[in-house]
Image (tube, rainbow, N blue to C red):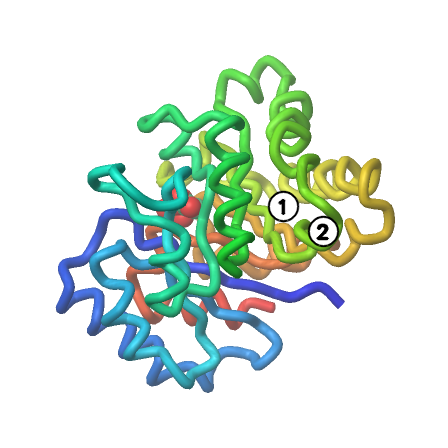
Amino acid sequence: MRQKIVAGNWKMNTLIEEGAALAKNIADRINEVPSDVQLILAPPFTHLDRVNGIIKGTAAALSAQNCADKDKGAYTGEVSAAMLASTGCKYVILGHSERREYYHETSATLNDKMALALANGLKPIFCVGEKLEEREAGRHFEVVGAQIREVIFNLSPEQLAQVVIAYEPVWAIGTGKTATSAQAQEIHAFIRKTLAEKYGALSEEISILYGGSCKPSNARELFAQKDIDGGLIGGASLKADDFIAIAQSY
Ligand code: PEP
């Protein structure tokens, strides 16, 4: 049985008290979430310790949105995987399209980040997804396949077992446009088939999340698809009602 996951990526939103209130609201209502769904909160770095204190002892898990590609030392402004683990993080989002686009993250950087995250006991939520022009040119399988091969294929089976994959078509992120459940299922199945080429039956164990304008009104249909194991939620994760309703959509 693959782990069902609903993860909230808060991005660069909420001041500390707002973030704490949101986390508390979600923690107080955690019993409304089916017990087989792992809820994950990914607040900004500055909120991690505070949010950890709020959700500790509940079924929700803490995630960071990024980590450094270096172990430690003179890298002003960076936050290491070891630091994240020390604040209580269990997960870290890596390779989000906003990081690839605005901060020029490449597969080479992501290989280093993945290795450091795994070495520090963090489970990477590794994001892949094509841009609009790539989908329109019919290149989405090629693009997503390359993103998987260039990073995931460097992992041992034991390492892959710790990884969650998130398919997030860039054209659907924050745009209100969602991939249809058929479009999403098609590419999730492709990702699983690609994993199977190298890892065989282990591919069946890997959770693959959908991300991109997922909300209470479309989550049920998306999550009903055979190869969709939950969601990475941006905008809708900033409202406790919506986030919990999405987690209830299984
Ligand atoms: C995201 O950026 O991970 C995301 C899925 O955002 P949104 O839900 O706002 O489209």
Q: Nearer the viewer, residue 184 or 60?
A: 60
Residue nearer the viewer, 119 or 163: 119
Residue 215 in which image quadrant: bottom left
Residue at 30% from the left image edge and 48% from the top image edge: 79
**Which amino acid is tagged 2?**
Asp
Look at the picture and state if 191 lies above or below 10: above
Of the residues tagged 2 and 1, which is closer to the observer? Answer: 2
> Disc 1, ligand 1: is the CB inside 8 Å?
no
**Regarding ligand 1, which quadrant of the image does it lie in?**
top left
Q: Earlier in the sequence, mark 2 or mark 1?
A: 1
User: Which residue type does callout 1 highlight?
Assistant: Ser
- Cα distance, mark 2 to mark 1? 11 Å
At x 49%, y 50%, the residue is 117
Disc 1 on helix, strand or loop? Answer: helix
Q: Which mark is residue 181?
A: 1
Could you classify mark 2 by the number of other residues whose Cα lies within 10 Å: few (under 14), some (14-19), or many (20 or more)? many
Left or right of 55? Residue 227 is right
Relative placement, left or right, of 30 versus 154 is: left
The spot of residue 61 in percent (x, y) is 45, 70
Tell me: residue 94, above or below residue 27.
above
* 186 on left or right of 213: right
Q: Which residue is mark 2?
A: 227
Give above or below for 236 relative to 127: below
